[in-house]
Amino acid sequence: MTGAKRLRIVVCDYSGHPFQVELSRCLARRGHAVLHLHFAEFQTPKGAMAAVADDAPSFAVEAVSLGRPFDKDKFLRRRFQEVEIGKRIAARAMGFRPDIVIGCNMPLDAQAQLQGECARGRAAFIFWMQDVYSAAISHYLGERLGLPGRAIGGYYRYLEGKLLRSSDAVVAISDKFLSPLRQWRVRLERIAVIPNWAPLSEIHPVEKDNDWSRRHGLHDKTVGLYTGTLGLKHDPALLRDLARASAAIGLQVVVASEGKAADWLEAQARDQGIGNLTVLPFQPMEQYSQVLGAGDIMLAMVGAEAASFSVPSKILSYLAAGKPIVAAIDNGNDAARTIEQAGAGSIAPPGDTAAFIDSVLDLTADPARRSTLGADARAFAERHFAIDAITDRFETVFAGCRSEGSAA
């Protein structure tokens, strides 16, 4: 975008994930004034959310806080908190006097607050679509609450469609989102498909024998590693069962996560005496490459019911780290397609515990194949995750917003 107008941009990255802040830093290096906002109390692995020496002077990152814990497990309280944090993020974003605001990972109630303030402040709004959020809400609340849950899901389908239609542009992470976008009557010329990536500047292959692996006694063990969010759309029992099945061959199953599912796994390991199952909290981003380096086989799971609305970003981090992957994911999910395209590992059907465990055990016994798969994983990442090329695509989206003007 050489010679183009420099913009004031706010990236509202609710979760604070690593690759979104890499985009913000790259935009700032190109001369744009960029404010990167994230929700302080949201419990998830965070990217590099502190200023570093080589940041462009036009880059800033800030945490927006509720001032109290976020209660993600109680729907009504969570909904009110999401509205409140949406208002706080929107107020800070508009105080920056932006030309463009990007809403990413925002719950729909928070996104509505942000988009409304953008319309009032005449800032172009981009909906960075990471999930079909209303599909997830409909599924989980329908299971928990029955008819009332499905009715709530219907409201969120209406709200999500309204927000998408009202956006100046939509960045979808998968072409599988084009079908629901068409159903919501979002104009095709306002949609760009830009797949997610992992930040190569922060995640790179490192030796297994490193400071982190030695500190945790993993440098001399074969490790099956799961990192990141572990929640409703995952099956933590699969990790417990893998540990049981692999104890005799010396595989150490390590889970770096937090929340109820991680607590459950830790209790299972303790109560059932599963000595080869280790549960750790989220690890700092500055140590993440060493964490991934400790793993010999990377693990991922997404339930079949979530395949249409979830593309786990941990897969992309595993690729960047140059590691082989075994994933229990529906073949229709983009992550499964990515693993296959990269030649980086094996896919097992969700719910097929035996197939998942057999794939892990086969790789445990085959170090040479692990090395080949890992090299192919990193090569794929280097071909597809170059931040300058990705930033070019976002700047094209920005140019379209400015030339078209506000959405109708």
Image (cartoon, rainbow, N blue to C red):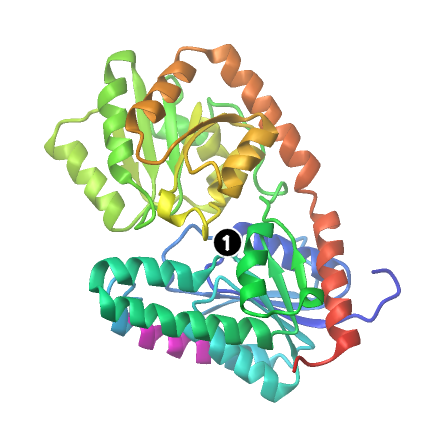
Which of the image's four quarters has the C terminus?
bottom right
Instruction: Tell me: residue 179, above or below residue 291.
Output: below
Instruction: Tell me: residue 6, above or below residue 257.
Output: below
Instruction: Tell me: residue 309, above or below residue 66.
Output: above
Mark yes or no: residue 384 visible.
yes
Tag 1 secondary structure: loop
- Asked if residue 100 lies left or right of residue 38, the reply is right
Displayed quadrant of residue 321? top right
Return the residue at label 1.
17
Q: Residue at x 48, y 80 (%)?
A: 113
Which residue of the protein is positioned furthest toward the right in this rendering?
3
Q: Residue 392's spot in the image, x, y percent?
A: 76, 55
Magenta stretch contains residue 81 = yes
Seen from the viewer's position, the closer of residues 1 and 327 is 327
**Residue extent of the magenta highlight:** 78-87
Which of the image's four quarters has the N terminus?
bottom right
Could you classify mark 1 by the number of other residues whose Cα lies within 10 Å: few (under 14), some (14-19), or many (20 or more)? many
Q: Amino acid at mark 1?
A: His
Q: Residue at x 61, y 74 (%)?
A: 167
Instruction: Tell me: residue 249, above or below residue 392.
Output: above
Which residue of the protein is positioned furthest toward the front in this rendering?
183
Q: Residue 2's spot in the image, x, y percent?
A: 86, 60
- Asked if residue 58 lies left or right of residue 369, the reply is right
> Magenta: predominant secondary structure element?
helix
Q: Residue at x 72, y 64 (%)?
A: 397
Q: Residue at x 27, y 51 (%)?
A: 259
Displayed quadrant of residue 85? bottom left
Q: Residue 383's spot in the image, x, y percent?
A: 70, 35
